Image (cartoon, grey):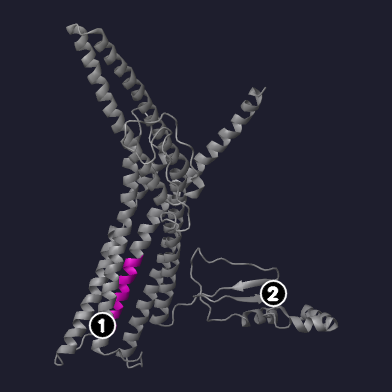
């Protein structure tokens, strides 16, 4: 990781502050001396305070905190060894993992949050969800602020839709009974049944009609509650998730571009070491034995294949979640109604995320590492076989790793562009809604008595 060294404007590092406080007269003398000091000497003092060991990466994540009278010097220096390059790559992977962890919190259930069971409409018997006795009043409002994760919101939507399904089933049973009684009344009228029998059938029909109206009102109330949870809770959470994904893809693109450059520099280090060894120049220490090399290369191949599988599953899970939300929203809207634009726009943005080339590149470097492990095992089992060039194998792994990192950076760049357009569209809608709310305020005030 880069080290930052702050240097004052006069080239010092702040060690003489206590001496200046103790001797103000001496401070004035030094100030007079600085005035007459040649400009070339002053610039030389500044340069002398710069450490060549500092390292800077061209990343948007580096933030400079300025202090009055002080400045920070950044010096770009390639890695001195392959181990240093791998440590730098590991640090960027940790940054990406940290950013992805911040996004995953939006989808998970926070353990300490209170859970509230969706209240049943009034008139229902507690715990009896499948009976024919249904209430007509709308369920009481729920505290939306207690639910901050997508999973909890989706669980509540599932509970409400299950309640709606049971209400519809109960209403369907009432409707069938009502139609059966109506057919019975028509038959009695046609056959000239007794008046008391006809009146009894009519009373049953009136009772079933009342139950049917109550059931329809309850279905409408639960449907409005589902729409309220979707619009007031799920969609704001989805907007927050989209902003988090946009930030995550931006960090992924920046980090992988830096990691690709680091991998290229590591490959150049290995190439220069091999060239120096061929020219008689003393290079790095001898490589480890074949057993250790086979174990390390095999472990690397396993990790790379796990990385490929995780990358593929990660992209597929995003597409699956967006497609599931889109399908659910489409099934919930009535004929002639529009789907929530945010869900449709997100499903379109997720389709722009294409990591197939990155997956193939990671699989290629994993196959290269596996081939090195196989060659090392053969060398260990057969002493007569010509030993493979391990430095060349390491270089090929670094080249493949750089290609994989570059492919991921390219995919992240395309995804970041798609999410950036989506976030800009969301911001425009928010501004339009805010302006519309401001325009409505004067009309509301004019209508007040």
Q: Secondary structure at mark 1?
A: helix
Q: Which residues are magenta?
A: 390-405
For the point 25% across and 23% down, the residue is: 177
Mark closest to the chain's N terminus, 2 or 1:
2
Percent of width and height locating residue 164 = 34, 36
Dot 2 alpha-carbon crowd within 10 angstroms: few under 14, some 14 to 19, many 20 or more: few
Residue 379 horizontal side relative to residue 41, left or right: left
Residue 394 in magenta stretch: yes
Task: State the quadrant of the C terminus.
Answer: top right
* Quadrant assignment, res 192: top left
Residue 299 horizontal side relative to residue 143, left or right: left
For the residues labelled 2 and 1, the Cα–Cα distance comes to 53 Å
Percent of width and height locating residue 31 = 80, 79
What residue is shown with label 1?
295
What residue is shown with label 2?
9
* Number of numbered labels in the structure image: 2
């Amino acid at each position: 990781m880069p080290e930052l060294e702050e240097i004052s404007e006069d080239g010092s590092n702040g060690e003489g502050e206590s001496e200046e406080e103790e001797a103000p007269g001496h401070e004035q003398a030094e100030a007079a001396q600085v005035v007459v000091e040649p400009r070339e000497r002053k610039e030389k003092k500044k340069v002398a305070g710069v450490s060549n060991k500092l390292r800077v990466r061209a990343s948007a994540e580096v933030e400079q905190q300025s202090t009055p009278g002080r400045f920070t010097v950044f010096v770009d220096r390639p890695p001195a060894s392959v181990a240093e390059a791998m440590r730098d790559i590991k640090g960027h992977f940790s940054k990406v993992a940290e950013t992805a962890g911040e996004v995953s919190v939006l989808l998970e259930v926070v353990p300490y949050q209170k859970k509230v069971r969706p209240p049943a409409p009034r008139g229902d018997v507690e715990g009896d969800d499948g009976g024919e006795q249904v209430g007509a009043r709308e369920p009481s409002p729920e505290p939306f602020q207690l639910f901050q994760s997508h999973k909890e919101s989706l669980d509540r939507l599932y509970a409400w839709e299950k309640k709606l399904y049971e209400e519809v089933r109960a209403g369907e049973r009432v409707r069938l009974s009502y139609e059966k009684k109506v057919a019975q009344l028509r038959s009695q009228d046609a056959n000239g049944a007794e008046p008391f029998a006809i009146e009894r059938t009519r009373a049953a029909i009136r009772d079933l009609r009342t139950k049917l109206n109550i059931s329809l009102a309850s279905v409408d109330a639960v449907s409005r509650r589902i729409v309220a949870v979707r619009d007031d809770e799920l969609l704001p959470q989805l907007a927050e998730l989209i902003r988090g994904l946009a930030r995550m893809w931006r960090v992924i693109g920046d980090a992988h571009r830096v990691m690709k450059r680091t991998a290229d520099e590591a490959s150049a280090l290995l190439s220069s070491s091999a060239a120096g060894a061929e020219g008689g120049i003393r290079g790095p220490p001898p490589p480890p034995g074949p057993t250790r090399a086979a174990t390390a290369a095999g472990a690397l191949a396993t990790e790379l294949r796990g990385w490929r599988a995780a990358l593929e599953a990660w992209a597929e899970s995003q597409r699956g979640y967006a497609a599931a939300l889109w399908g659910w929203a489409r099934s919930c809207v009535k004929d002639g109604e529009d789907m929530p634009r945010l869900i449709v726009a997100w499903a379109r943005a997720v389709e722009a995320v294409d990591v197939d080339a990155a997956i193939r590149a990671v699989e290629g470097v994993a196959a290269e590492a596996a081939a090195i492990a196989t060659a090392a095992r053969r060398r260990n089992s057969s002493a007569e076989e010509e030993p493979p060039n391990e430095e060349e194998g390491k270089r090929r792994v670094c080249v493949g790793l750089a290609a994989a990192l570059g492919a991921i950076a390219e995919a992240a760049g395309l995804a970041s562009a798609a999410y950036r357009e989506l976030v800009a569209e969301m911001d425009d809608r928010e501004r339009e809604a805010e302006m519309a709310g401001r325009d409505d305020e004067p009309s509301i005030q004019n209508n007040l008595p």
